[in-house]
Structure formats: C-alpha cells, structure tokens
Image (tube, grey):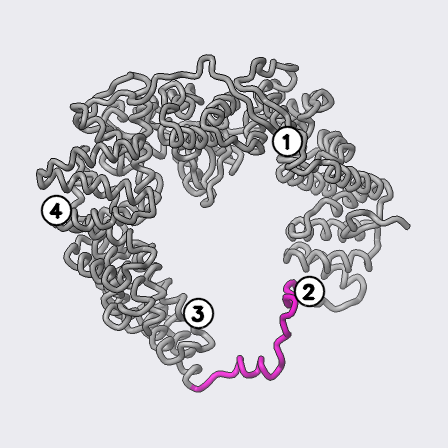
Amino acid sequence: MAQSARTPRGGPVDQTQVHRRSIFVLSFALMVLHTPCPARAQLVEVSLPLADPAKPGSPAFRKMKEQESQGRWTECARTGRGAWSQAGLAKAWVLKAWLKCASRSDISQKKLEEIPAAINAWDKGALLAVGPWQPELLADVLRSRLYAIEFSMKKNTKMAGEYLAELFNEIPGDDKKSLGRAWALAGELAQIKHDLPAAEQAFEHALKFQDSPETQEKYSAVLLALNKKTRAVNQATPEAGEAPVSEAQETTEMASSELEKQFNERMKSSKRENDLMILLDDCVSYLNALPNGLKSKWAAAKVLEIHQTVWLKLSEPNPEEKWRLVHNRVLSAIEKMDQQRTLSWLPILFRRGDYEGTFRLAEKLRSPLASTVSGAQVLWYGGRSAELIGQYRKSEKYFNNYLELHGGAEQAQEVQLHLALTYLREKSHSSAIAVLERLMMNLRSDRLELSARYWLIRALEATRNPRSVEEARKLVDRFPFSYYGIRLRSELQNGSFEWPFSSKGLAGVKGKFYLNPQQKKAWDRMQWLRSQGWWVEAQTEAQAILPPADPLLKVLLAQELARVHSYPLVIRLLSEAGDAAPDLRSAEIIRLGLPKVYEEVIDKEAKKRSLNPVLVRSLIRQESGFAPRAVSSSNALGLMQLIPPTAREVAQDLGIPNLEIPEDVFAPDVNVQMGTAYLSKLLQKFNTSVPLALAAYNAGPQRMEIFLRARSDLRPQIEKASSDPWDEMWMDELPWAETSYYVKAILRNALLYKTLDQQRISLHGVLWVDLLVSDQTHQSPPAEKTEVN
C-alpha cells in the first residue's frame, strides 16, 4: 500500500489525502530542483521608479479588506468566496483573510456555515502552504478545523472524522497543544462510535501531549466502562541519552541529615506563622549551612521573594517608615550570604531598582573580589549604583578601580563614560575632559561616541575652551540627525535650524535593480496587494526584497516601498544610503522616512489629549516604524507598542469593552486611542515633562519613579521645564541604555518633523514645550464608551 508522504499521527489513512499530499511534495520538490541556483538564476530587471504603478483591480478585494478591518466577519467571509477565485497570484493572502473571517463568523455565532467552503479551498490548493503567509494561514486552518470537528462531532461523525484525518496531517510536530487537542477529539469521536479501546488509547496520547483535567476525566470514564483502574499517564519522558534515576540514587537524594530536618521544620514553622523576617533568617542560615541542600533552591528563591515584597512596598509613593527598617534588615540578612550567591544577586537587585541594596552588596564583595575575574562585575554595579543614588565620590572610586584592574574588559568604555559623567556632576570639568579624550581614542560604539563627544563639548564650554566649537562641528558632521547633532548645529547658527543638506530631489532620477524569480513573484504580489489596499500583506511581501548596495538604488527602492507603507524598511534604507552618500539627505528624500500616515486618527486623538500630533507621530516612528502589526521581543503590540497589561488597563480606563488581544490592539484606531491616552496619563504623572513621560513610556512609570526617588537631590532639576544641557544630563545616566536612546530619538524626530513642515525652526527656550498643545495639568476626559468588534 502506498504511504502518505507525511505520516498521519492518528486515524485511518485517507487515500485522497495521501494523493493530495504526494502531489504537494512532488510539486515542491520539482520546484526546488528546477529553481536555478543564485549564480545561474535568470534574473529579472526592475526599473525604478515604476513607470506604470499597479492599477486598482476588482472592488471586491477592497470591500473584503474593509469588512475584515471593521469586524464584519460574515460579510467578509461571503465576499471572500467570490473574491478568492479572482485573486490570481495573491490567492493565499485572500484565502487567509477569508478563513479568518469565516472562523470568526461561525465561532461567534456558534454555527458551521462559512468555514467548510474556506477549508475546502485550502484543501484544493496544496501549494498555498508555501510562502510568507504560511505561519498565520496554517494557524487559522488548525483553529478552524478544530472548531469544525467539535461542532460536527455529534451531528455528522463522518464529516468530523474527515476533518480530523486532515488535521493530523497538518499539525506541526512541535505543536503539543494542538496535538493534545486533536487526540482528545479522536478519543471523543471513538466514544461516540462506542469504540472504547480506541478511545482509551486516544486519550492516553492526548494526555502525553497536554495535561488537561477535562481529558483526564473522560479518560477515567472510559477506563471505568472497560472495568480498568485509573492510571497516571507520564507526560515527561527522559531525553535521549538521559539515564533513568536508580533506586539507590533516589534513596540517597531523598535522605536528609538531622541538620536538614531541623532547618526544614524551622522554615515550615516560620512559613506557617507568616513571619517573613524569621523565615528570611532561617533561609539564610540554611543556605550558609547547607549551600547544596535539598531545599537550597527553594530557600534562595524565598529570600529573593521576600526582598521583592519589601522592595515593592518601599517603592510605593510615601511608604511607611517601617518598610525602610524592614528593607535594611533584609539587606543585612543578604549580606551574610556566601560570596558567590551574593555576587549572582547583584544584577537582580540592580534590575529591580534597589540601587542602595546593590551598593551595599558591592561594598561587601569589593575587597575580596575586586582583582578577580568577578571583580569587574562587582566594580561596575558598585559604581553605577553609587552614581544612581548620588554618591559621586564613591562612584568615582569604583570606576577608577575598575579601569585600573580591568581596563581591557568589554565594559571598560561604558565605565569611562560614566566616570566622566560623575566628574561633571562634581563640576570636575578638567577631569571629565581627560577621561573623555582617552575614551575617544579607541571607541567601538557609535552610541558611546555620540554621548562622549557631546559631554566633551559641554565640559570644554564650561572651562571656556574655544576648542568646543571645533568639537561641535565634528559631532554635527558625524551625527547630523541625532538630537545632540541638531542641538549643536542650531547653537552654531544662532539658535535656528534649517535643512542643512542638498536640495537635490528625485525628479528624473532612474535606476535598475535585479530580482531572482522568487523575489520577482513577491514583488508582483506586493504591487497587486498595494493596488487593493492590502497594506499589511504587501509589507510582508516586501521583506523578501533584498536591497541593492548602491545608495541611489536604495533610495529609489525606498521610494517604492513607501508606497506600500513598509516604513521600517524605508527608514533603514534611507539611513544606509545617507551614511554612504550624504548628498542623498535632501528634505524630499528624508521625508520618505518621516511619513504622515494614519494622519486622521493621530490628529483626532492627539487633539483630544491636548497633544501636538508631531509628538504622537514621532513616538510611533520610534516605537513601530508605522507598522500596525509590529510585535516587539517584549510582546509590545501595534503602532504605539502597548504591552498587553497596559492595553487592558487603558481599555478599562477608556471604557473599551471586550478588548481582544492582539487583534484589537493591532487596529490603528484603537491602538492610537489607547496609546495617546496612556501618554497623556504619564505626562500628568510626571509634571508635564515630555522627556520624563517618554522615558516612562519606554521603561515603565514605576521604574522611572524609582529612578527619580533615588536621585532626590536632582529631582527638581530633572522635573522642571528646561532644555538646558545640564538639566538633560539624566538622559545619559539612566540605568537602561535603550531608554536613554529612545527619549533622545523621539525628541529628534519631533525636531525633524517640525523642520520639514516649517523649513526653519528656532531652538531657543524649552525645545519640547510646543509638543503640548495646552496645560496638561487638567483632569483626564471622562471615560469613553467605545465599541470594539
């Protein structure tokens, strides 16, 4: 008997399925075999700019996309039935939207009317599985099949069985959740057919993939019907090559000494009585006596948990004095720990914002460890934590010690920058100049170079050294589009800033670049999708286009990609082109990377919150590059990059019901509404300071509060409305490098947007005050009732 190219994971072998899969595999293999290698591939020439941009096609596709974006699922699914056959090279994208709408329509209405036709279209189009649409399309297929099986289980077992057979062939091997659910459905289907032995085995397989109380209950019922005893199903199996634990080894591990037993009883007692301080002392004593004891991991985690509990209380506004005393006791207990454990906890306390605690631990470790390999870590955290609590002399001591003992370490240049900043805080300008000049002799980072050059200039100005002008010109030439570069250029021009580069535009400029056949297909799909207003799909196809090396061609390609709103790529291409050829930095060209898309919703929501739309636009450019479905490594979503907890909190404040994450947060109207509301809330919290609110938007308001509380001596200076360089020094002292860059990048974006609009701007006074349309100290608007489909 012929076997399926992809062995089914359950159910009888369906010959139609075998045939279809075999054709798929054969077709894909032939495509691979007949695709020439890049060296011999038949390249396709593309002329830029396009002489004949894609023309609008059938109105059905625009209508379908509009219905999808508005959540009109049933209408979208029915439009999709007719549109799919006309989609040509973009069939997979249309099917993806059709299937999404069909599944949402049926699931929301608890019926099975739209899914079968969409699934049937998928089953007929084997090669639709290959392409940039594949991950999301396959996820929609699996979701739809699961629902169809559940719905038809009791009404049409034959249909349910057919769907189930297809499902097993499509679930990826590493998708344990879907495999567990599929096997559970197979068990339920066998139960309905009164095939209890099959149901028994299916439920056993299901429980191996996913532990589910519901499946366990059904499994137990089947065993009862078969007069068998309930038995546990092992989910975890030893890794390949992993030896099972012997009985003797197990006995040894379980055996505990009298000391172990004594500590165990003490810790149980203090935990039972909920006395955190006694429990803390018991855990520390246990770890010192039995560092590798049976409960050492638990005890260490408990110490950190107690610290976190106390630190959160101390971090609240106006904490009770008792929490300072408790915090001191916790730190005293931790200081009694062994060196290696204390060393491993330094970065944990620092990340939590407990800079005082970090410094105390560093003080304990400095003497014994400073000259060892671990000493660099001790001296770095000691110096930074001292800097962040305003202990500048101690910070200088740590940083100088670091450079003496670990001057060749990777972090040494970062140490030099912060040593210079502490000297500047102490007004030791000459010392700062000496450190910064040494630093710039061997810099390896643009970020460090920009900050080092800038503060060298300010230190030279403070000592009235005329070399400051020469150094300012160097920075402006090296980093023309940085916040510091724009500031210094304006100072060299009596406080005004206008576009400093070539006025050369793109009129009449042409070029050619080449694509391989697969890239050309992606290019054609991108153009077709753009013509239909399917922007997100067009942007996905744009990822397949490899940019040319020539700077002018990069600009011409960026111009084309801007038409599909693929702004993250546009911004990158323009940056690379401008660095290679400064004459390609004309206002017309740079405007491509500073777009005004989503203008209607941005203007509306900014006005509602008394914000200048320039601020919102500048933030979106930095957060997502105007990609509405952007997802960060921390799971921040959409244009204004809201993490799910923040999105839920703001949705509740605004009265937005039934927020569905991530889909609703990807919707530009909803995302900008929530993002501007959150930004406005932060502005009120941080005394209408735009830089502080931006830092809080990126790092989190609680972390910014902790930072400000630690710098109590500087808080009035930081919070006041000022653009004096010395009042902005905190931006480079932040404990988060990403946030430091982020704040300056958004302020830079705002200055560039204003320059493109006004040709010339004045940089006198507070540079960000016009980003607030009116006084932000007013109360927030009442909660808005907004329907989200």
x and y percentages locating residue 504 in the rendered image: 37, 17
Q: Look at 50% across and 17% down and name the residue there.
A: 510
Mark 4 or 2: the one toward you: 4
What label sits on residue 233 in the rendered view? Answer: 2
Whole-number angstrom distance, CA of label 4 to CA of label 2 = 70 Å
Residue 687, above or below 787: below
Q: Residues within 10 Å of mark 2 (few under 14, many from 20)?
A: some
Q: Secondary structure at mark 3?
A: helix
Q: Is residue 8 left or right of residue 299?
A: right
Q: Which mark is residue 429?
A: 4
Question: What kind of element bears circle 4?
Answer: helix
- View extreme (front): residue: 40
- Measured Cα–Cα span from mark 1 to mark 4: 58 Å
User: Badge 4 local density, few (<14 within 10 Å), some, or many (20+)?
Assistant: many
Location of mark 1 (residue): 516
Task: Report the magenta stretch's main SS.
Answer: loop
Whether 654 is among the magenta residues is no
Q: Are marks 2 and 1 in contact (CB under 8 Å)?
A: no
Q: Which of the marked residues, 2 or 1, is nearer the chain's N terminus?
A: 2
Percent position of residue 545, x then y: 56, 31
- The reply to whether callout 4 and callout 2 are in contact (CB within 8 Å) is no
**Which numbered disc, 1 or 4, marks the residue that appears first in the sequence?**
4
Per the model, the C-alpha gap separating discs 3 and 2 is 27 Å
Instruction: Find the magenta span and give its range.
Output: 232-258
Residue position for label 3: 298
Task: Answer whether labels 3 and 2 touch (C-beta < 8 Å).
Answer: no
